[in-house]
Amino acid sequence: MGMSPASVTKPVRAFLFDIGNVLLRFDFGRTLRALAAKSRVSDPGVLLGAVDVLKAGYEEGGMDRATFLREVFALLEFRGSEREFVTAWEEIFEPNLPMVALVERLWGRYPLFLLSNTNDIHREYIFREYPFFKRFSGGIYSYEVGASKPGPEIYRIACERLGLEPEGTFFIDDLLPNIETARSLGFHAHHYHHAEHEALLGALPAEVRV
């Protein structure tokens, strides 16, 4: 499959969305504060540093949920239950309503897909809590494929498994390194910020803006 730089004349045939801070805004500080209240590490900032390596390994498929929970409980000396931990881990999201409206507008006109660095706890939660995720025909998730953005491999996997052609795919992400990789592989790509949603609308194909 070709991965040359995108031609501006190539029509967009599908959309590929990041999740965090694109479709859903999130505040991981909520998790840190809830965990700190029942952990040896009581400072949320210090706790972030302690959890970050385990979180990265979990999201890149280096450990399953049971291993992650066992290791993070031991690391933090967490005094709560597994259910309390999972609840704290899950409840960080809120829908980005302008983006949800865009998904509804695109649905039925284009195939919609997801590409996310995430874990199974978050994936199960968001599909359970936010019905608009049913509008997506498929997705590639870092913990399942053992690769993550901004590395190029996860984009190649997305193209192979979702049947995408980079030059015909419009990719939306909030992190510039992820956008840079996508552009280098030939995707139409937009660096998104929720406070500049109108900039995304202006960058969409003309037929979508009508």
Image: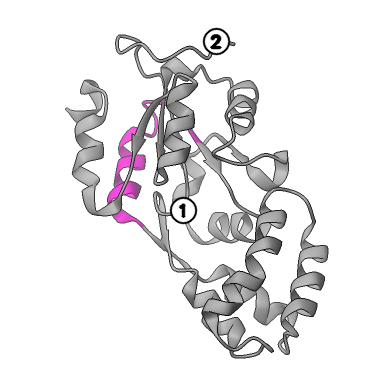
- Left or right of residue 209: residue 16: right
Quadrant, the N terminus: top right
Looking at marks 1 and 2 on the same chain, the residue that comes earlier in the sequence is marked by: 2
Q: Which residue is mark 1?
A: 20
Residue 96 visible in the displayed image: yes
Q: Position of residue 89 (x, y in %)?
A: 60, 70
Question: Is residue 183 found inside the magenta-colored segment of the image?
Answer: no
Say what secondary structure mark 1 lies in.
Answer: loop
Q: Which residue is mark 2?
A: 2
What segment carries the magenta color?
Answer: 96-113
Q: Specify the amino acid type for callout 1.
A: Gly
- Vertical arrangement, residue 70 with respect to residue 56, above or below: below
Labelled disc at residue 58: none
Mark pair 1, 2: CA separation: 28 Å
Front-lying residue, 80 or 3: 3
- Vertical arrangement, residue 201 with respect to residue 88, above or below: above
- Tell me what residue is drawn at x 69 percent, y 89 percent: 40
Q: Residues within 10 Å of mark 1 (few under 14, many from 20)?
A: many
- Tell me what residue is drawn at x 77 percent, y 65 percent: 68
- Left or right of residue 63: residue 196: left
